[in-house]
Amino acid sequence: MILSCNNISKAFVENTVLKNISFHVEDRDRAAIIGNNGAGKSTLLKIIMKELAPDEGEVIISKNKTIGYLAQHQNLLGNQSIYEELLSVKEDIINLEKRMRSIEETMKHVGGDELSDLMDTYTRLTHEFELKNGYAYKSEIVGVLKGLGFDENDFSKQTDKLSGGQKTRVALGKLLLTKPDIILLDEPTNHLDMESIMWLENYLLNYDGCVIIVAHDRYFLDKIVTKVIEIENASALVYNGNYTDFAQKKAMLRDAQLKQYYNQQREIKHQEEVIAKLRSFNREKSIKRAESREKMLNKIEVIEKPMEYQASMRFTLEPRVVSGNDVLSVKELKKSFNSLLLFKDLNFEIKRGERVAIIGKNGTGKTTILKIINGILEADNGIIKLGSKVQIGYYDQEHNVLNMDKTVFDEISDEYPTLTNTEIRNVLAAFLFTNDDVFKRIGDLSGGERGRVSLAKLMLSEANFLILDEPTNHLDIASKEILEQALASYTGTVLFVSHDRYFINKTATRILDLYNSNLVNYIGNYDYYLEKREELSAVASSAQNTVFTKAIANTTASVQSESSKSDWQAQKEEQARLRKINNDIKKLEDAIEKLEKRNEEIDELLTHEDIFTDVAKLMELNNEKSEVETQLEELFEKWSELNE
């Protein structure tokens, strides 16, 4: 065990974020902490780093183990270059190298014992230098910088002039180069493009230490993690395996808990009905049986119904009108900023019903293409043509389509003035804005909250061509899955930019890879893209970077296995058996009712003077009563057995 959290609890005012959180990680574990936005994931990392004190519990880190932390937001001070900032991590190696150079100079001018002593020191320092990878530390820095998406022209940029995302990448590079025993990463993929994310995956997979990650990137989690710690309703459960394993196990666990709960509820209801039936027979033995069953029922430990999932978005996307088959045509599109050429001679078409993802490295112009199509930017050259009856709905990752000075309520009501106050509130409630939340100023909202407002407007637009720029940014996993389901059932057309590979894999029917200022077309999802990209990129390059399209068709024959047939047969047999038992119970109850009625008639007859004075008649009725009660006893036994 390298790190252990024992019964960690934390509350802010009356809001309990974490309650009795316990887990541990071993050396070389790759653990993910997941949960909805606001579940307390970042709070837990800060408690581990001792930046926050827990209300209860303790964090234990093994002796002499180092720990490093990448927060979501960085504030790099000073005016060093990017390269100098990372170089500062290797200060011990640089000082060691300076000492070695100094000794080399001194050894030129001394001899005898002094030279021998210097040689011993030099040998020791050289060995230490080799152990610290001193001969390759500059190459290591360059490798990390390039892996994180910086090219050599970026190395000299001053850190105080970098964007927030660039600062985060610099901080991540510094952390990786320090090589602590435990790395804590809070949303490390947020500012990385696909190539950089894949590089980070490989780096962490081979990292000689423990890694704890907070992330919403499910593809990344699938590749990296060996353990998932889910925080839900302030509690934590630990699952071994990657994200897919976790999702399957969680679904199975919840299904099992629900099944157990509903089975017990059915049994309780059944026993209550049996008790009521036994009491209705109004016989001493049946009443005693009813009382006995009641005692057993009262001893049952009632299973609580599993808690419902935390509130999540509820929405569907549906176009108001159907567009023509040709939705978008782009020909010879070109765009540059000053001397920087983003792309040229881009040609592609989109047909109705397609869900097309544009992917590529950061800075290649993906968002620019969307802005040109939406008329926000002008192209240097090219023709953009929309098809018949095409109505665009645009989701902007920077949320420039939102007015930062308006309230959430006003943003919707001003855009859709025909909606009533109740209708607006209902729509906003579906996107988790309730009560006074609807009067929050958009400029004061978090990135995730602004994203939900943009999605609400997108739903209300009833557009038939959705253009989405990084729609999953700032969304938690549950919200991403809801968006995926909405897009999967959407009957219109979608063009989107995303670096969320899991989302692309679930959503896209075609991928356009912006590669070397041109597009390479892949007809399939992200898995298909990975399989074919090297082959198609090579073909595209040899064809003077023209767009190359290749279709793939997969036909899957669905054959019912023998095991599923036997399961089906067993299920049918079980259903038939239960129907027979229910029929038999009904017949027994009818027979019991007839005998009970006859028993009451005999009791009534025995009170008549002409009967109890007639010995022969009296004996006959007494014998019949005895026989009826014997039959009733047998029927009660059978009825109880069948009910069990």
Image: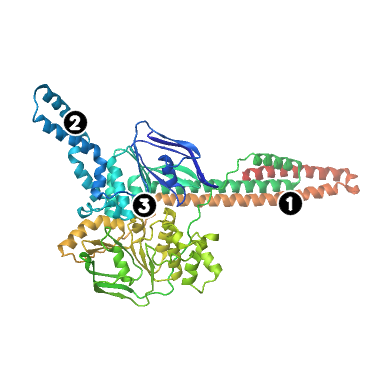
Give the CA separation, mark 1 to mark 3: 69 Å
Whether residue 148 is visible to the viewer of this picture, yes or no, is yes
Q: Quadrant of the N terminus?
A: top left
Q: CA distance from mark 1 to mark 2?
A: 104 Å
For badge 1, the amino acid type reads Lys
Q: Residue at x 81, y 50 (%)?
A: 601
Q: Which mark is residue 594?
A: 1
Q: Which SS class for mark 2? A: helix
Pointer 2: residues within 10 angstroms few (<14), some, or many (20+)? some
Q: Secondary structure at mark 3?
A: loop
The residue drawn where x is 54% and y is 52% is: 576
Q: Is residue 630 left or right of residue 416?
A: right
Compared to residue 361, the image places residue 29 above or below, namely: above
Is 45 situated left or right of 15 in this image? left
Q: Residue furthest top?
A: 113
Q: Residues within 10 Å of mark 1 (few under 14, many from 20)?
A: some
Q: Earlier in the sequence, mark 3 or mark 2?
A: 2
**Front: mark 3 or 2:** 2
Q: Nearer the viewer, residue 266 or 340?
A: 340
Question: Residue 206, can we see it?
Answer: no
Location of residue 180 in the rendering, given as x and y in whole percent from the top left corner:
31, 38
Front label number (1 vs 3): 3
Looking at numbered disc 2 in the image, what kind of residue is underneath it?
Leu
Residue beneath disc 2: 125
Point out residue 472 in the picture as x, y percentages from the top left corner: 38, 58
Decide which of tag 1 and tag 2 comes sooner along the chain: 2
Q: Which tag, 1 or 3, sits closer to the chain's start?
A: 3
Q: Position of residue 458 (x, y in %)?
A: 43, 67
Kindly identify which numbered label has been placed on residue 217: 3
